[in-house]
Amino acid sequence: MASTGERTLRLLSLLQTHRYWPGPELADRLEVSPRTLRRDVDRLRELGYPVNAHRGVDGGYQLAAGAALPPLVVDDEEAVALAVGMQAAAQGAVAGIEEPALRALTKVVQVMPPRLRKRVDALRGVTVSTTWGGRRDEPLDPEALIVVAQACRDTERLEFDYTARAAQPARRHVEPHRLVPLGRRWYLVAYDLDRHDWRTFRLDRLTGPNRTGARFRPRELPTADAADFVKQGIRGRPAAYEVEVLVHAPAAALAHLDRWAVIEPDGPDRCVLRMSGDDLDWPVFALGACGAEFEVRSPDALTERVQEWAARFGRSGISA
């Protein structure tokens, strides 16, 4: 049997999933008697963890939200994931939380054992933020992001005001499914209860999200996953520019761009890249990252933008 300290940490790790644990199931997982389980729960309460107990035949335990944040227990992989995620936030993945993310990152790294700190330092050294130039149409509200994420996690219906393209704000009532970060934007995939269909919502156009308290049974998404649903929706919308470029490289070499573009083989050593968007700087950036020769097929404005970038880089490379 595990020591009291090890068992208490294991109990806390299970409770921090925030699911409801029937007493007998929790005791079986810890390989202890119900009486020992009750003592371990009391020990957690003394340490400041608000554990709710439900008595009766279906009695069990659940970790509640407390007035203060007690110490968290995470395993090695979770600790590394936290550090890398906070680094991305500190670099501006979500506008408005850079400073607190940096403070949290510093605290987490400071208390890590040396073996984990080495892993985190290695990952931080080779990881580049996915944001590009910090450009967004509107700043993303971190509080709204948290509310939406919690509603997705808890399968709880959500209400918010949404401003679609060239439209007036309207109240939407949805069953949230998943959040998808794509390019420089975040998207919510949800079932719209008023329109009786699946929809994609840009978070920078969403305001005043409110969790209704009504739970729902998740519906089956019509695509393989939420990211695929968002990409299909973006490709189906009218955009200012429809980009088509012939790239002199195998399609597999551009697989890292399939989140933003459609890549189609055009023989063993060539492929066609297609993108849609409201500006041309992002396609130029993506093409520059291909590491291969390319020919712009459309639009003509993209050729001009590539020439502008080339001239700028050329001037920057000339020594005085």
Image (spheres, helix red, strand yellow):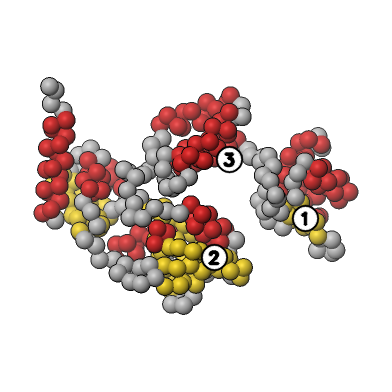
**Above-or-below relation of 231 to 173:** above
**What residue is shown with label 1?**
52
**What residue is shown with label 3?**
78
Q: Residue furthest right?
A: 35
Which residue is painted at 63% across and 39% down in the image?
74
**What residue is shown with label 2?**
210
The answer to which of marks 1 and 3 sits earlier in the sequence is 1
If the image is split into quadrants, where does the C terminus sit? Answer: top left
Q: Secondary structure at mark 3?
A: helix
Residues marked 1 and 2 touching at CB (< 8 Å):
no
Q: Secondary structure at mark 1?
A: strand
> What percent of the width, then of the height, locates residue 22?
77, 57
**Above-or-below relation of 118 to 15:** above
Viewer-side residue, 65 vs 128: 65
**Above-or-below relation of 214 to 276:** below
Q: Secondary structure at mark 2?
A: strand
* Res 34 seen here: yes
> What percent of the width, then of the height, locates residue 181?
41, 52
